[in-house]
Amino acid sequence: MRKLVVVIPAYNEAGSIGSVIKELPPRIQGVDEIKVIVVDDGSTDNTIGEAIKAGVDEVVSLGRRMGLSYAFKTGIEKALEMGADIVVNIDADGQYNGGEISDLVKPILSGEADIVLGSRFKGWIEQMSLSKRIGNRVATWVTRMASSFPTTDSQTGFRAFSKEAALKLNVFSDYTYVQEVIIQGSLKGLRMVEVPIQANFKRFRIRKKSWHDNSEKLRHLQATEGVCPDGWSIYFCRTPSRDESSDTLSQNRLGHSICANSHSDFDLSDCRLPAACSWFDG
């Protein structure tokens, strides 16, 4: 049986992580089992809650911001612990099409490659800024010189690794892993290929703005109407007043109500549940 584990490093990606998880294919020819891990890099928004809501199999929380490279390494290690035969890394920002994972892993399934890089420049890119294009071209040129591998997109965050390749990689950088993996792969004799992929920067910008705009409105509206999504509760929150001598909740100090849960990015220090006898302690 072949097991594929998808690793999604994430930092403050509540607006896109759910869609990224839901776009992943439930089945891939040649793969018997697919699992999904989100490595949360100390997010301060509701990234974990949105991942759980979308059906992620496992969340690894780093507790504080450790950086993309550390999150990547942690995800690879966790995937191997789970018995992965193939590991796919995909960014949490929504720019990549998760449905293309089947194309990404084909060279590994066929025995052609140990590492597969999804190249946006061999495929199709929607609205990448000029500064990003220039920066990517420069980084790619440097990586080609250092690795002797003719990469066209050294910065891609959409990659697949065989178990053997994942076991051989040792990423030392604290900032990024993308160039180092290619250089190490070349030095260690791992077979690397690129496949064309799609990237849509416009889509992930729209998703983020839409989620942040709509989620706050929705949670306030649902609380006002006396309902909240499953796993969420209504908190009554007071408006700060000049007289803070009393902690008794009175009608004239009731500022608003809101839907929230344990993963919410709201400050609930001045809020309480309806049945609570004292202020919620956060």
Image: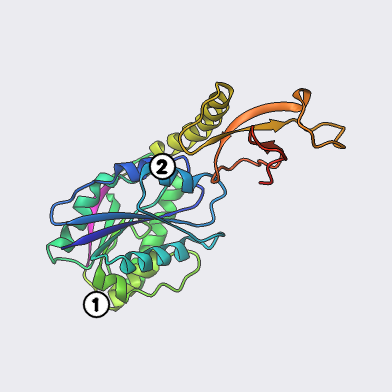
Residue under label 1, please give it: 189
> Residue 169 in the image: x percent, y percent?
34, 73
Q: Amino acid at mark 1?
A: Gly
Q: Is residue 72 left or right of residue 65?
A: left
Q: Residue at x 13, y 66 (%)?
A: 111
Q: Is residue 251 left or right of residue 16?
A: right
Q: Please state which of residues 40 and 95 is positioned toward the viewer in this rendering.
A: 40
Q: Which secondary structure, mark 1?
A: loop
**Which of the 4 image quarters holds residue 30?**
bottom left
- Label 2 crowd bin: few (<14), some (14–19), many (20+), radius 10 Å: some
Where 203 falls versus 251 (above or below)? below
Residue occupying the far bottom of the picture: 188
Q: How many marks?
A: 2
Q: Is residue 46 left or right of residue 182?
A: right
Q: Main secondary structure of the magenta part?
A: strand
> Residue 246 in the image: x percent, y percent?
84, 36
> Residue 267 in the image: x percent, y percent?
66, 42
Residue under label 2, please give it: 53
> Residue 179 in the image: x percent, y percent?
38, 66
Comparing labels 1 and 2, the label whose residue is closer to the camera: 2
**Which of the 4 image quarters holds residue 252?**
top right
Q: CA distance from mark 1 to mark 2?
A: 41 Å
Instruction: Evaluate if marks 1 and 2 touch, with contact meaning CB atoms under 8 Å apart.
Output: no
Q: What range is drawn magenta here?
A: 192-198
Q: Amino acid at mark 2?
A: Lys
Q: Please state which of residues 70 and 127 is positioned toward the viewer in this rendering.
A: 70
Q: Which secondary structure, mark 2?
A: helix
Can residue 238 be seen here?
A: yes
Can residue 128 be seen here?
A: no
Q: Is residue 205 magenta?
A: no
